[in-house]
Amino acid sequence: MLDTLIAFMNTPEGSGILVGVLTVWPFWRTFLRAGLNPLWALLVFLPLIGIAAALAALCLQKWPVVRPGGVAHPQGASSTIRQTLKAAGPPAPQHE
């Protein structure tokens, strides 16, 4: 069985599926964080143009988590960082 799997991975179809499986997760997460439908990440499985098509879908759509003018949406990660820094208070003075 292992020999059959190795033989399949040495074919163009097998290596294409392997590359697709390894790249779909980062694309899925990127689409989610951009506020877009993560099913667009499945474009990576298209032969020859998959990754380029997924990047084009990511680049050419309006991202709902970004407001006009490039300001991040309050629900984005940057607001969480700001809230954490606010809760910590101002930095303590450094004495030499």
Image (cartoon, helix red, strand yellow):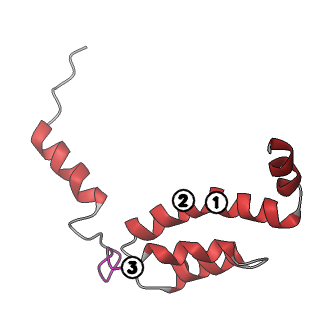
Q: Which residue is mark 1?
A: 21
Tell me where the magenta segment starts and ends, as one range. 63-70
Per the image, label 3 sits on a secondary structure element best described as: loop
Label annotation for residue 56: none
For the point 19% across and 43% down, which residue is it? 85
Q: Which residue is mark 2?
A: 25
Which of the two marks, 1 or 3, is nearer to us in this view?
A: 1
Q: Is residue 28 magenta-colored?
A: no
For the point 55% across and 82% down, which residue is it? 57
For the point 80% across and 59% down, which residue is it? 15
Residue 79 against residue 89 in the figure, above or below: below
The majority secondary structure of the magenta stretch comes to: loop
Mark 1 residue type: Val
Q: Nearer the viewer, residue 35 or 67?
A: 35
Mark 3 residue type: Trp
Residue 60: give x, y in percent of width and height.
Answer: 53, 86
Label annotation for residue 63: 3
Q: Residues within 10 Å of mark 3 (few under 14, many from 20)?
A: some
Q: Nearer the viewer, residue 1 or 17?
A: 1
Which of the two marks, 1 or 2, is nearer to us in this view?
A: 1
Q: Earlier in the sequence, mark 2 or mark 3?
A: 2
Residue 11 against residue 42 in the figure, above or below: above
Residue 40: give x, y in percent of width and height.
Answer: 52, 78
The Cα–Cα distance between marks 1 and 2, rounded to whole angstroms, is: 7 Å
Mark 2 and mark 1 in contact (Cβ < 8 Å)? yes
Residue 56 against residue 23 in the figure, above or below: below
